Image (tube, rainbow, N blue to C red):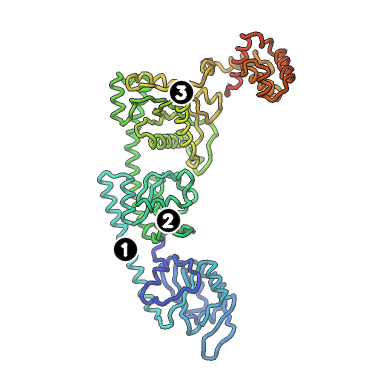
Amino acid sequence: MPKGSVYGLPLQEVLKVDSLQGSTVLSGASGLLRMVSRLNVMEVPDILPWVKPHELLLTTGFPLLHADSVQPVQTGRGGPVRGETDHMAQLVAEFHERGVCALAVKSGRYLLDIPATALEASDRLGFPVLSLPADVAFDDVLADVFAALLDHQAETLAIAHDLQRSLETVLFAGGGLAEVTDEVARLLDVAVLITAPDGQVQATGGDEARRSALTALPVFDATGRLRTEELAVGILHQQGPGSGELAVVPVHGGGLNHGYIVAHSVTGQLSEIGVHALERVATVVALLITRQQAVAAVESKYRGDFLRDALTGRAGEPQQVAAHFATLGWDIDRPLVVAVAELEPDNDTGSGLHTTLPVRSYQDRLAAAWQQVVRSRDSKAPVVGFSQEIITLIPVSGTAAEVEATVAGIVTEVARDRAAGRRSFSVGVSRVVPDPATAPEALTTAYQQARKSVAIGRRIHGPGSVTHFGGLGVHRLLSLVPDPAELRSFAEEVLGKLAGDEPEALDLRMTLQALLDNSLNVAETARSLHFHYNTLRYRIRKLERMLGPFIGDPTLRLDITLALQVVEMRGL
């Protein structure tokens, strides 16, 4: 269960102080990680109104004999009382409900045994019940535990102070998120990562074993994204052997959520030291992210302006263009395709935590996703987000099928994570530009091909399509007709009733298309449609009555073929 930051020590650490040596955990051992931040002594039976959260409650057992909730069964003359009732179990449940850390009973003098029902309730709730040595003095316990708490708080503040100073040095030296996570991991002896608001990991720190233990936790989805929508801020005890503790702290700056810092300790020793230190780190990280965003915004505009000029033929002479690409860290001296990605309009808002984001945020997130995926494959491939589109120059090689597979792999990775609230998008891809470094003007043509592909692909295949210019075929010509009404009119004149959406029209259109695909081979068409030969002959006669003698008229067949392609196009 998640819990917030509490200044204190885990109960298992408190039990190590000198005065508590020899104490026994009678039940509720699963709660030994409960935090102790104060102590109290139970001197009266009606203690419940006075207990506080994270309190270690000490008692001789005598008040329990006179509590309304406990009725002893028998009293030994001059000896201790042996109680076996359900009432103390209810008292244990009440302590647990009020957040008390544990109940420590001095054994032997007044209460010989804790009732079995109370111990069962303690185990069930994970509420520790302790047996203290008979000779322990409560004032010694109070002094020892308070001293341990003060030492621990001083240690916490010292670690947080040292960590902040160390990170300020990293920051002033020009370090980034990677250096910050490495320093935090070193000083806190943990695995640590920094995520974006949607849970995408931005930087990690710690040795390989610790990082592996962190990423193996169920708080990550299949893509490696932290499930931020399911996590609470503070300390989370992870289930399973060796899972340890997870500390989650948000990074806020300028009224915005910049993400989260997450630290993981397999030994489960983070407690408030980790949270308090990470809260200090979050301030430094927010400053670093804000600085990076400002610098990135300027660099992005500069890069975007140049790439726009290059794609529209206004960037200068070929040698100047190639040299400028190189100074920006982009390599265009290899075969490339231009890919244009556009968000789907209107109400296709996807699903997930951020489904009510403004359009600008969707665009920014889509651009960031393309940059992350492409740069993980090739750090020198240009990726720039404009106001309405994301443009990527993707290095490719091999056959047309291999080019399509490369693009498909990138698009799949970008589209895989829907939790960021991104809307679906369509992609248009140009033909391969074999030598853009010596002929950058070819990029202009490729850019126009990609833009045309994304527009036509959305018409043909609908939202979320990936369309290659080389596969457009006759749709390239149809797209040149500026008036959709003219295309609709042509299809209706050629196909007549077959242009409609009635079941019979759809069925006959399927038969007609199959016949054309099989070059009018009746036997082959019947086999592909699983029709009897005579059934198909009957349908052909019916189609010729509706459309004319297309079997023997090649011009009419061309008109019908074009009309069928028009009907397939969407948005007309």
Q: Give whichever of 432, 94 is nearer the camera.
A: 432
Q: Are dots 2 and 1 in contact, CB under 8 Å? A: no
Query: Can you identify the residue that label 3 sits on?
Result: 451
Q: Does residue 271 appear in this view?
A: no
At label 3, counting other C-alpha atoms closer than 10 Å, the crowd grade (few under 14, some 14-19, many 20 or more) is: many
The residues tagged by marks 3 and 2 sit, at their Cα atoms, a distance apart of 46 Å
Counting residues from the N terminus, which is met first, the one under dot 1 or under dot 3?
1
Position of residue 445 relative to residue 142, above or below, is above
Counting residues from the N terminus, which is met first, the one under dot 2 or under dot 1?
1
Counting residues from the N terminus, which is met first, the one under dot 3 or under dot 2?
2
Where residue 319 is drawn, which disc sits there?
Answer: none
Residue 305 spot, x, y in % from top left: 35, 27
The residues tagged by marks 1 and 3 sit, at their Cα atoms, a distance apart of 60 Å
Residue 288: image quadrant is: top left
Disc number lying in front (2 or 1)? 2
Query: Can you identify the residue that label 1 sits on?
Result: 155
Query: Can you identify the residue that label 2 sits on?
Result: 246
Secondary structure under the numbered disc 3 in the rendered image: helix
